[in-house]
Amino acid sequence: MVEPDGVAGGAGVSAPGLVLLLSGPNLDLLGQREPDVYGTATLDDHVAAATAAAAAVGLTLEHFQSNHEGDLVEAVHGARGRAAAVIVNAGALTHTSWSLHDALAAYDGVVVELHLSNPAAREPFRHTSTIAPVADGCIAGFGGLGYPLAVEAVARILAGRA
Ligand code: DQA
């Protein structure tokens, strides 16, 4: 489906240019939390960078953060038929949440898994991702740069489907 603004979306998506950015537990503490691992930028800083990157390619970004798994599952449900893509940094739920996995499996838009750090290079418990099997791809290890990169990936994937 190609909209008048040239932004493509999936079949049945009511807001074809909408990208939902989801932030999981403890990401509200970015800037204060383990700055040696996650940097000093706040979540608001990352959302602003993602919002600007989205606007530059004609997409609209909506952000939702929660420390509660069920809230994130419901946010994915709410993206069904509404958002063309979900970018998700699920925090530690990445390594444990099969309910988030299943919610994303029931979502038919583009899914990008995002991490500030590179979980594959960290403790063994971070080497498993429940999101990876239901994601189109993953951007990890580039710090805050990952946010605009994820938006760019979404824009290119959607354009490729136009
Ligand atoms: C993280 C990596 C996870 O392993 C960790 O639990 C987080 C942040 C990241 O962005 O690097 O909370 O998702």
Image: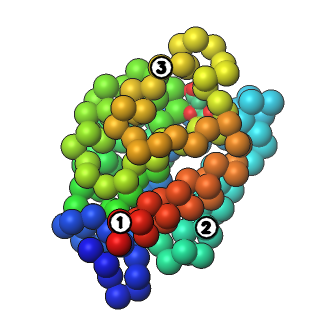
- Residue at image point 41% right, 66% down: 160
- Can I make out residue 150 in this image? yes
Residue type, label 2: Ala
Residue holding disc 2: 53
Residue closest to the eye, 67 or 131:
131
Front residue of 142 and 31: 142
Q: Which residue ends up furthest to the bottom in the rendered image?
A: 4
Residue 64 in the image: x percent, y percent?
45, 52
Number of the label disc, if any, that sits on residue 128: 3
21 in relation to 123, above or below: below
At label 3, which amino acid type do we have? Thr
Q: Specify the quadrant that holds the N terminus.
A: bottom left
Of mark 2 and mark 1, the one earlier in the sequence is 2
The image shows residue 108 at horizontal and vertical percentages of 25, 52
The secondary structure type at the circle numbered 3 is loop
User: Relative to residue 135, is residue 58 depicted above or below?
Assistant: below
Do the CB atoms of the residues marked 2 and 1 lie less than 8 Å apart?
Answer: no
Please tell me which of labels 1 and 3 falls first in the chain. Answer: 3
Above or below: residue 56 compared with residue 124: below
Q: Is disc 1 placed on a helix, strand or loop?
A: loop
